[in-house]
Image (cartoon, rainbow, N blue to C red):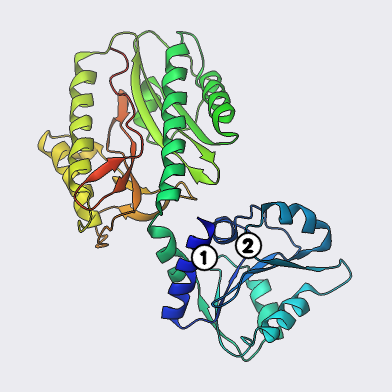
Amino acid sequence: MLKDRQKRLKDFMKTDGSECLLLFPGVDLFYSTGLETHASERLTVAIIPTETDPIIICPSFEKTRLERGLGTGSIRTWEENENPFELLGKILQELDVDQKQISLDNKLWFEWFLKIREQIPKATFVDAKAIVQASRLIKSEGEISLLREAAKIAAHSIRDTIAEVEVGMTELEIAKIVDEKLSKASGTTAFAIVQSGPNTAVPHAGPSERKIEKNDVLLIDAGPKYKGYLGDITMTSVIGEPSDKFKKIYDIVYKANRAAFAASKDGAIAEDVDKAARQVIIKEDYGQYFSHRLGHGIGVEVHEAPYMVSGNKLILKEGMCHTIEPGIYIEGEFGIRIEDDVVVRKNNCEFLYEAPRRIWE
């Protein structure tokens, strides 16, 4: 899977005219090399040439740790009393790219850019965002399998948490339960949003000390990080008996979710997927209460391209993965969001994992 990702990157680099790609700690470095490491004042960088394996530059004391996670390539190190940017410049000269076009991580610190430019002043620098984004847009079947598992973990953890909720619990206590379930299944919780009662009318409110009351609406939006890939599922339920208004609005949001699901397929336009869901809600006179975009891409980041939003003319392609999460939020009363993770296929859309719905029944 890693070699496939690197091949995609190199193909896009050649099309773009870049001779190598420089990536720094973050999700793009993980995507390209398999390495998970944090940014610090000490230089760590992946050099990805178009024709050879990656070269990782890191502090010497980090070598052993990074070797354990490096799929392909080699590691070059620097000591604490050395200038790591001189080593970077030397390697780029060895690769004969120091006077050619180099794609730079778009999240690169400006101070580091100046130091790189000082070492290779004749190079031409371009933003690597287009290359990396284009590569990350289409998921391989291996990546899709990881996203499937992440979505499944999210759905099971949320469902099992809701089954344990009792009147009197606080949102923070419930968040702890879902966090424990996500962590146990995946190793890492990416996020866990828990809202109840009128708090559910705020799309992304964090958990509070509010206690669950009888017949409260409960919304949980949560996901794990599973082998570097994210899940993102939202379930809205009731702790007790749902009101007629809740059931009516839930059905509208559910229909909007399924309308978007039907609209998402190879060749569809991103904004039209948003429109398909939004029209269902507008038709029922709740359009003003759907206050955010329909969805976002999902992969090594929980929010990435493609975005299902008005104005996005991107044509969807098979292998793109995104969320479908319409919602209706009535201030002072309650909100309902139904979120699924899906993959675009040639003739239709496919759930990464079909989460159970109407779980209060």
Crowd class of label 2 (few under 14; some 14 to 19; many from 20; radius 10 Å): some
Q: Label 1: state its secondary structure.
A: helix
The residue pinned by badge 1 equals 6
Q: Please tell me whether residue 22 is drawn above or below residue 63 in the rendered image.
A: below
Residue at the location (49% across, 50% down)?
Answer: 300
Left or right: where 219 falls relative to 185: left
Residue at the location (49% across, 9% down)?
Answer: 168
Residues marked 1 and 2 touching at CB (< 8 Å): yes
Q: Image quadrant for the C terminus?
A: top left
**Which quarter of the figure has residue 286?**
top left
**Which quarter of the figure has residue 352?**
top left
The residue pinned by badge 2 equals 72
* 160 or 293, nearer to the observer: 160
Residue 43 is at least partly visible in this image: yes
| Type of the residue with mark 1 | Gln
Residue at the location (57% across, 88% down)?
Answer: 100
Q: Give whichever of discs 1 and 2 has the lower sequence position.
A: 1
* 278 or 62, nearer to the observer: 62
Residue 347: percent from left, percent from top: 19, 50
Residue 232: percent from left, percent from top: 42, 38
Residue 109: percent from left, percent from top: 63, 68
Q: Which dot marks residue 191?
A: none
**Which quarter of the figure has residue 248?**
top left
| Type of the residue with mark 2 | Thr
Left or right: where 239 falls relative to 95: left
